[in-house]
Image (tube, rainbow, N blue to C red):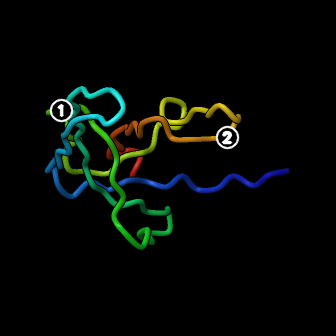
Amino acid sequence: MIKSLPAPIVIIDSVKLDNISGTSKKTGNPFSIYKQEGYLVTQDGQRFPDKISFLVDEGKAYSRGDYHINFADSLDTDSFDGLIFKRLTLTPITINQKQ
């Protein structure tokens, strides 16, 4: 039987979005993506050694706070059936869930 692992949380300290824009070499069309940073933290309180960054929609930064990763919406499989993050989706942790 597989032992259940504690779910990591993501801590957002800043609502700042970084914009990366340019022209696609493949299509020649302009593009613009937005990234936000946070920290991945295990349930025992250990922070991942570095910040993580993830894509968000323009103007849709996550607020400061603690979040669970919504794995059902965040994961997918690639063309070789490998597990990948398609886009990190976060769900706010309520006060009751922190206790």
The part of the image, by quadrant, that contains residue 58 is: top left
Q: What count of labels does the image hold? A: 2
Q: Is residue 47 above or below residue 72?
A: below
Identify the residue at horizontal 38%, vertical 53% (top origin). Answer: 10
Picture disc at residue 99: none
Location of mark 1 (residue):
58
Q: In the rendered view, does 48 fall on the left or right side of 29? A: right
Location of mark 2 (residue):
82
Q: Position of residue 9 (x, y in %)?
A: 43, 53
Q: Nearer the viewer, residue 35 or 65?
A: 35
Q: Nearer the viewer, residue 77 or 88?
A: 77
Label 1: how many Cα within 10 Å (few below 14, some 14–19, many 20+): few
Q: In the rendered view, does 16 fall on the left or right side of 46? A: left
Identify the residue at horizontal 48%, vertical 35% (top origin). Answer: 86
Identify the residue at horizontal 61%, vertical 34% (top origin). Answer: 78
Mark 1 residue type = Glu
Q: Position of residue 2 (x, y in %)?
A: 79, 52
The part of the image, by quadrant, that contains residue 20 is: top left
Identify the residue at horizontal 58%, vertical 56% (top origin). Answer: 6
Mark 2 residue type = Gly
Label 2: how many Cα within 10 Å (few below 14, some 14–19, many 20+): few
Q: In the rendered view, does 76 fall on the left or right side of 29? A: right
Q: CA distance from mark 2 to mark 1?
A: 29 Å
